[in-house]
Amino acid sequence: MENIQHLLESVKEKSFALQILSNEKKQAILKDLSKIILENKALILSENKKDLDKMEDSNPKKDRLLLTDERIDDLASSLLDVAKLEDPTNKILSEKKLENGLSVKKIAVPIGVVGIIYESRPNVTLDVAALCIRSGNAVVLRGGSDAFHSNTVLVKLIHQAMEAHNLPTEAVLLLPTDRKFVPEMLNATKFVDIIIPRGSQQLIEFVRKNASVPTIETGAGVCHTYVESSADLDKAAAIVVNAKVSRPSVCNSLDTILIDNNIASEFIPKILEGMKAHDVEIFADEVTHNIISQHKYPHLQKAKTADFGREFLSYKCSIKSLNGLDEAIAHIRKHSSRHSEAIISTNEQLCNRFLQEIDAAAVFTNASTRFTDGGQFGLGAEIGISTQKLHARGPFALEKLTTEKWIVQGDGQIRN
């Protein structure tokens, strides 16, 4: 195959079949797809194993690649959640009658063709396809070679659900994994309306620099949790450990723990058992290194400058002590990727300052950053977490897969 233009042309042509679907039809497709996923669980797991067998156990991407019975059940359930959401299209956003008699209204319509480039995350295949079908959009999926077998079987099952409803399967396209086709996709302005990269910072930067198609950045997560001196230390320890170890390979996992100097010696021992249970490697500044050393923690390193502002995506984190909220805010402003940031504190005034002064897509008080997620926020699913400010910020979900159209109805009016 020399190029993919014919594939992209076909997606664009078939996208109009999705744009005119009724709300009930879109719901029915997703409900049927949920059943098909559950009925083919063994096949999905078998194909996923082919991908897993090619990846080293030490690779932090392996957890993102892994599908299990429980994860497939969750994916099938999320399809039903998306089906239950209100149809974001054909809503009247504004309506008025002009003095000259023209009726002018603004409505929400599908974007058209959504392109997504992602890495070892087969769940993204289903999430994105579901959100695009529900919002009446066609989709071009470019997954990584690591998940080739997983993505291929999932798209076949999506096509099965579409065929059952007499929809053109070309409207959900899985591109070849050959990297030579990526630049063509990024510059297919006639056929693709928006590109969304989901993956490493390197992938996001590559897309941003090389795409002429408009791009939404679902940015890397460099997430901080600041434990303020008034914090309930037991609650704080549970939050910090959860944010780090519950699923370290995802973008909302904790990267840097910031601790007020006044409580560092009391708080740090409370997290070491939970961290040790997962062999978390800790990169500590001088003050916290001295404290952790006293407790014979086996996975301790002295932090370097580069360990702050670093997205680890594994069982690793950095830790730093500082003096008060002002220093915490300054550190976060310097190192944050503006994804998810948290403060643990019982001081309402300081919590409110943190919420107001931290610039991030999601800001938490007394909760784990792991909650930054479309499903957790009641959005059904997400394409990614946007860290930019135009069009969408935070979980990029169903309601953001629309644009606007002006409808003007007249009766012979002409402009003077």
Image (cartoon, rainbow, N blue to C red):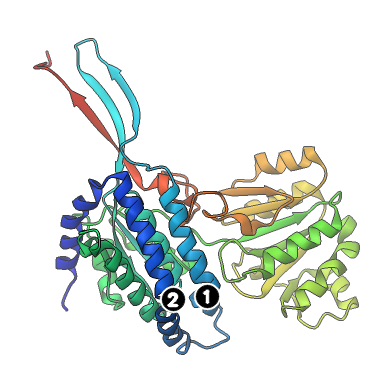
Q: Residue furthest top?
A: 99
Q: Secondary structure at mark 1?
A: helix
Disc 2 residue type (three-letter):
Lys
Left or right of 281 in this view: 124: left
Compared to residue 22, the image places residue 382 above or below, namely below
* Left or right relative to 69: residue 404: left
* Left or right, 87 with reference to 180: right
Quadrant in the picture for residue 399: top left
Q: Position of residue 170 (x, y in %)?
A: 21, 64
Q: Which residue is mark 2?
A: 41
How many numbered circles does the render carry? Answer: 2
The answer to which quarter of the image holds residue 411 is top left
**Image quadrant containing the C terminus:** top left
166 or 216: nearer the viewer: 166
Residue occupied by mark 1: 69
The answer to whether any part of residue 196 appears in the image is no
User: Residue 74: horizontal and vertical position, in percent?
Assistant: 52, 65
Within-10-Å neighbours for mark 2: few <14, some 14–19, many 20+: some
Q: Residue at x 46, y 67 (%)?
A: 199
| Residue at 86% from the left image edge and 49% from the top image edge | 230
* Label whose residue precedes the other's in the sequence (2 or 1): 2
**What's the residue at 42%, 61% (across, down)?**
127
| Mark 1 burial class by Cα count in 10 Å: few <14, some 14-19, many 20+ | few
Q: Observer-nearest residue: 246 or 391?
A: 246
Three-letter amino acid code at disc 1? Asp
180 or 84, which is in the foreground? Answer: 84
For the residue labelled by badge 2, is the local secondary structure a helix, a strand or a loop? helix
Q: Image point 78% across, 62% down: which residue?
A: 238
Q: Position of residue 117 (x, y in %)?
A: 37, 66
Task: Answer whether labels 2 and 1 touch (C-beta < 8 Å).
Answer: yes
